[in-house]
């Protein structure tokens, strides 16, 4: 008798033909399906290859549903992860994939999303900016940025697009300097928190009335920001307004030989070509390229195997119904035998739908977010129970 192992091309796709557990189960599946469909009483018009095809489809369906729900839990940690070598060959089968591994959570995706905000705040980002200057003229208040903003070599900045930016796009003004910004730290004196301590421990010539304060370092950081803001706003008395391609200065330059106006600018950014080398841009970006392969049958527990058996039976029932539907009845001696093809198709499809719904409902409760929420609910419930335990007078309950 032909078995799965010695049959040529037993399944349509051949994904699991080399899985020894699948091979053993496939031979038993033929007996299981045929007996469940009444083969001992009435011949079941299904070949072994048809049943094996239903078996392969069931395992593929189970893998797809489980991997989809696993992706909901892990996709944030896998964003940008390379996909090229994560799956074995063209068959897309584990165990070379990551479908059965528990990854470490990370903040890479969140950090990536935060980069535009960092750039807007002038604290970093993924794209380069450039600096240039405009030669101011006496009694001239308006200057065309695209025409007059130049680098040290005298080239127009608009023609010198930085790496990671899209050329010939609108220029974005990040910062404007009338002259080199003054370092706020030059205003620090012996009243800063650090200098308090330096003075206290470096010298012993203070009078007895001297009082030292030990202040946290963030006092200095806050003072630096305050002095820098004061230097830029309160001391400069300069301002500007962007209007289209021009910048208007307040007040109007009145010197015979005014200083240059310095600007730090950028252009529209190219999300697929940042300023630095980023190989991960060809990595995981959505559900379609997560490095998950099909689950091997030998790595599926009894819960999953029973679901696969039932789904195989339901699929086989649908296939048998389609076969019998081609013949409304079969002529026999002095009568006709009516076939139940339509009923089998309906039953098979309903059972498949119920099995999918049941599996999805179970997996809905087992995503990582739901597990954390369930654990939190259990902890709250435990605390409510513990509050009802009477405490001995003058004693406390120690759990450990």
Image (tube, grey):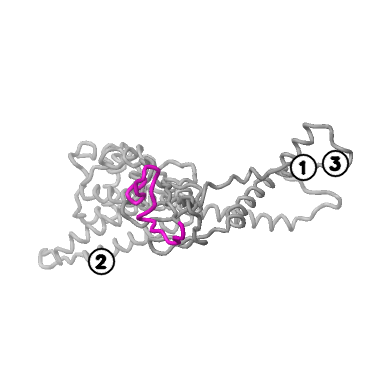
Q: Secondary structure at mark 1?
A: loop
Q: Which residue is mark 2?
A: 343
Quadrant for residue 142, please give it: bottom left
Based on the picture, tell me whether residue 146 belongs to the magenta stretch. yes
What residue range appears in magenta?
Answer: 138-162
Query: Does label 2 or label 1 sit earlier along the sequence?
Result: 1
Based on the picture, tell me whether residue 366 belongs to the magenta stretch. no
Q: Which residue is mark 3?
A: 210
Quadrant for residue 383, please give it: bottom right
Quadrant for residue 83, please give it: top left
Question: In the picture shown, does residue 83 fall above or below 138?
Answer: above
How many residues crowd around disc 2 within 10 Å: few (fewer than 14), some, or many (20 or more)? some
Q: Residue at x 63, y 43 (%)?
A: 185
Please give left or right for residue 82 compared with residue 8 in the image: right
Closest to the observer: 302 or 69? 69
Closest to the observer: 253 or 381? 253
Question: In the picture shown, does residue 315 fall above or below 328?
Answer: above
Closest to the observer: 112 or 360? 112
């Amino acid at each position: 008798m032909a078995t799965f192992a010695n049959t040529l091309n037993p399944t349509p796709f051949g994904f699991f033909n080399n899985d020894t557990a699948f091979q053993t189960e496939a031979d038993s599946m033929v007996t299981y399906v045929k007996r469940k469909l009444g083969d001992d009483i009435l011949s079941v018009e299904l070949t072994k290859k048809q049943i094996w095809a239903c078996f392969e489809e069931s395992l593929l369906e189970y893998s797809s549903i489980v991997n989809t729900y696993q992706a909901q839990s892990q996709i944030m940690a896998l964003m940008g992860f390379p996909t090229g070598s994560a799956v074995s060959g063209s068959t897309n089968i584990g165990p070379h994939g990551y479908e059965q591994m528990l990854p470490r959570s990370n903040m890479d995706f969140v950090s990536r999303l935060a980069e535009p905000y960092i750039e807007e705040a002038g604290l970093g980002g993924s794209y380069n900016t450039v600096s240039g200057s405009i030669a101011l003229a006496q009694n001239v208040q308006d200057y065309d940025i695209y025409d007059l903003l130049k680098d040290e070599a005298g080239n127009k900045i608009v023609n010198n697009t930085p790496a990671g930016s899209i050329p010939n796009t609108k220029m974005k003004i990040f910062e404007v300097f009338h002259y080199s910004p003054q370092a706020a730290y030059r205003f620090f004196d012996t009243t800063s928190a650090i200098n308090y301590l330096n003075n206290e421990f470096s010298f012993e010539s203070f009078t007895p009335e001297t009082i030292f304060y030990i202040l946290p370092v963030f006092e200095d950081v806050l003072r630096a920001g305050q002095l820098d803001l004061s230097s830029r706003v309160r001391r400069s008395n300069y301002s500007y307004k962007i209007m289209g391609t021009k910048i208007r200065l307040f007040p109007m330059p009145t010197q015979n030989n005014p200083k240059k106006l310095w600007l730090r600018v950028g252009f529209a950014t190219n999300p697929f070509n940042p300023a630095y080398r980023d190989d991960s841009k060809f990595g995981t970006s959505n559900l379609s390229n997560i490095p998950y392969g099909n689950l091997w049958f030998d790595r599926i527990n009894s819960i999953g195997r029973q679901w696969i058996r039932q789904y195989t039976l339901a699929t086989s029932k649908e296939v048998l119904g389609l076969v019998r539907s081609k013949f409304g009845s079969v002529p026999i001696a002095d009568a006709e035998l009516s076939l139940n093809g339509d009923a089998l198709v309906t039953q098979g499809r309903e059972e498949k739908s119920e099995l999918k719904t049941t599996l999805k409902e179970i997996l809905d409760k087992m995503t990582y977010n739901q597990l954390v929420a369930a654990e939190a609910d259990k902890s709250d419930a435990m605390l409510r129970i513990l509050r009802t335990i009477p405490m001995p007078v003058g004693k406390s309950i120690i759990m450990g």
